[in-house]
Image: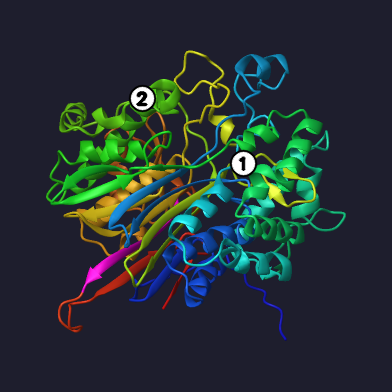
């Protein structure tokens, strides 16, 4: 056997991906093992909901750099049985024992008066296991244990690490190593590194996560009750108390995810773009699209369309940063942002040159997105995240459970809409998307990457709707990213001439070398047949991200 000497992250030549077609099942994930896990449960008699749960659980194992058992989750799905679009908000609230005053008094605020992003302080109640149980109970065909079986197998018996995963794993270890003087991340290093030198796996190495396997087994056997009211909940409580954290058993025991009605924007020509209502930032994508529908982009100069997209996103973020948080706390009503009057008003503000719309600087994160569809007509758009990479850096001893740091987005200024309060849900970056047309489901889509997500949703949705691109082309098209002020980045594949023209319009354009900074997405669309099958038939067409290790499994 020869040893490979190539660098799998070095791509000297363009690589093409074509859209994939199927008619019985399609599972589309950011890691190929997760796609395989989803297809595996479908072949055992499950449906798209079982596949989504299986893939989501598998991603906690095969992409721990972005999510874990301690993640939050959101879902939009078309139920063939109910013939309707449903949403699930499985983001967790801040602990009841936390407050701005306590964070400041305990010395946990940063030097500039913000929430910390590492350690126990930014940990809110994780919602992912509850999401798995809720989706499985309401729509699945198999047991939760059946759905989690592939993930348990990966964790116990091993899986091969893919190139981008290895890269971000190493980056995570470097970050926690710089902040581990007090030993608070020792359990993270015990779980996710090997040897005295705390080495992370290279591409192609086989990884096992036995503690993770035990926790998933317990979650499956108890329909997630162990995580919220059993042994795992007690383990989380004990670890938090020992480290001076705020999360408690009672916070977990009182948690339940929420079924919600997705927001819908009537974009154009019968197309609807659908997102989860706040506390998520899906409203930002819909606000920007509400502005863009006032322009005839198919006949406009391409540079002008890009310019308007960027300005629309800036205007949308400016409003969202001031208003979006937990509507239970703020009474926030998003409906006004979806009215034609709002879009028209904001469109009139977009001139020929770039303008600063907000002074806030968004942060970065790690997230996984997946989508699934089956031959019955079920379609699932699902996303879960530990927020910033591996998250808080906290791993509950003996469980393999890495906890998110979603509370880092809370403000410590009580005058802010997203001010920290006990039991409050924070502004949330992760957003699953869904397309409808003329009242019928077209399909799920999503783009991972913190505040890049609504920007990616706008670009991918417009690529599909306005420019008629198939899912793969809609994802592959070169992207831009607004960062702050008038600063923005474009991918290396972005048209140089257009980038220069944007710069002449006042955009501060730089070239981004990190492909993951521009989001990682998946997409599935229904395609109606035209005569090959007696009833016309329906097939599925999918595209998957060329910016990471993703793959489609289909049948």
Part of the protein shown in magenta? 519-528
Q: Residue 177 appears at what percent x and percent y?
A: 76, 42
Dot 2 crowding, Cα within 10 Å, few <14, some 14–19, many 20+: some
Which quarter shows the C terminus? bottom left
Question: At 39% from the left edge and 34% from the top edge, which residue is drawn?
Answer: 278
Q: Residue 519 appears at what percent x and percent y?
A: 45, 50
- Cα separation, mark 1 vs mark 2, equals 25 Å
523 in magenta: yes
Is 520 above or below relative to 423?
below
**Residue wearing tag 2:** 332
Q: Is residue 179 visible?
A: no
Residue 327 vs residue 243, the one in the foreground: 327
Residue at the extreme bottom: 1
Camera-near label (1 vs 2) is: 2
**Residue wearing tag 1:** 404
Secondary-structure class at tag 2: loop
Is 464 above or below relative to 308?
below
172 in magenta: no
Residue 361 vs residue 213, the one in the foreground: 213
Q: Residue 387 appears at what percent x and percent y?
A: 56, 42
Mark 1 vs 2: CB contact within 8 A: no
Q: How is the image coloured?
A: rainbow
Q: Residue 97 appears at what percent x and percent y?
A: 66, 23
Residue 139 shown left or right of residue 262 in the figure: right
Residue 492 vs residue 28, the one in the foreground: 28
Secondary-structure class at tag 1: loop
Q: Is residue 186 visible?
A: yes
Dot 1 crowding, Cα within 10 Å, few <14, some 14–19, many 20+: many
């Amino acid at each position: 056997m020869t040893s490979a000497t190539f660098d799998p992250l070095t791509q000297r030549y363009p690589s093409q991906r074509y859209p994939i077609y199927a008619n019985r099942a399609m599972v589309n994930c950011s890691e190929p093992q997760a796609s395989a896990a989803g297809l595996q449960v479908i072949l055992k008699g499950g449906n798209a909901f079982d596949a989504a749960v299986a893939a989501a659980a598998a991603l906690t194992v095969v992409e721990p750099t972005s999510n874990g058992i301690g993640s939050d989750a959101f879902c939009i799905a078309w139920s063939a049985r109910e013939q309707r679009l449903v949403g699930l908000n499985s983001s967790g609230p801040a602990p009841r024992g936390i407050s701005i005053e306590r964070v400041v008094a305990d010395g946990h605020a940063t030097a500039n008066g913000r929430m910390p992003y590492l350690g126990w302080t930014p940990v809110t109640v994780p919602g992912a296991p509850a999401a798995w149980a809720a989706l499985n109970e309401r729509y699945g065909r198999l047991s939760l244990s059946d759905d989690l079986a592939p993930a348990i197998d990966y964790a116990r018996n091993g899986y091969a690490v893919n190139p981008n995963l290895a890269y971000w794993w190493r980056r995570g270890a470097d970050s926690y190593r710089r902040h581990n003087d007090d030993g608070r991340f020792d359990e993270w290093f015990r779980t996710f590194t090997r040897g005295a030198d705390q080495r992370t796996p290279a591409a192609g190495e086989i990884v096992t996560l036995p503690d993770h396997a035990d926790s998933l087994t317990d979650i499956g056997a108890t329909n997630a009750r162990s995580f919220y009211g059993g042994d795992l909940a007690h383990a989380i409580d004990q670890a938090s108390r020992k480290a001076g954290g705020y999360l408690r058993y009672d916070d977990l025991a009182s948690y339940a995810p929420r079924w919600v009605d997705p927001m819908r924007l009537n974009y154009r020509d019968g197309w609807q773009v659908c997102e989860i209502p706040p506390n998520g930032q899906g409203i930002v994508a819909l606000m920007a699209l509400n502005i863009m529908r006032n322009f005839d982009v198919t006949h406009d100069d391409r540079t002008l369309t890009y310019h308007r997209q960027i300005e629309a996103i800036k205007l949308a973020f400016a409003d969202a940063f001031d208003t979006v948080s937990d509507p239970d706390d703020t009474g926030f009503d998003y409906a006004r942002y979806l009215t034609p009057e709002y879009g028209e008003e904001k469109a009139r503000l977009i001139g020929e040159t770039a303008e600063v719309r907000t002074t806030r600087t968004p942060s970065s994160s790690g997230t996984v997105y997946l989508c699934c569809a089956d031959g019955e007509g079920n379609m699932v758009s699902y996303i879960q995240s530990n927020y910033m990479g591996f998250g808080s850096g906290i791993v509950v001893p003996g469980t393999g459970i890495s906890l998110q740091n979603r509370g880092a987005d809370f403000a410590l200024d009580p005058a802010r809409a997203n001010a920290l309060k006990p039991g409050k849900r924070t502004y949330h970056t992760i957003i699953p998307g869904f397309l409808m047309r003329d009242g019928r489901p077209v399909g799920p889509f999503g783009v991972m990457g913190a505040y890049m997500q609504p920007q990616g949703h706008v670009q991918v949705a417009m690529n599909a709707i306005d420019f008629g691109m198939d899912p793969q082309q809609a994802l592959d098209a070169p992207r831009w990213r607004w960062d702050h002020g008038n600063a923005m980045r474009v991918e290396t594949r972005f048209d140089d001439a257009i980038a220069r023209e944007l710069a002449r319009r006042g955009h501060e354009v730089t070239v981004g070398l990190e492909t993951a900074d521009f989001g990682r997405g998946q997409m599935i669309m229904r395609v109606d047949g035209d005569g090959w099958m007696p009833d016309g038939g329906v097939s599925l067409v999918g595209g998957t991200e060329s910016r990471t290790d993703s793959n489609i499994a289909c049948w």
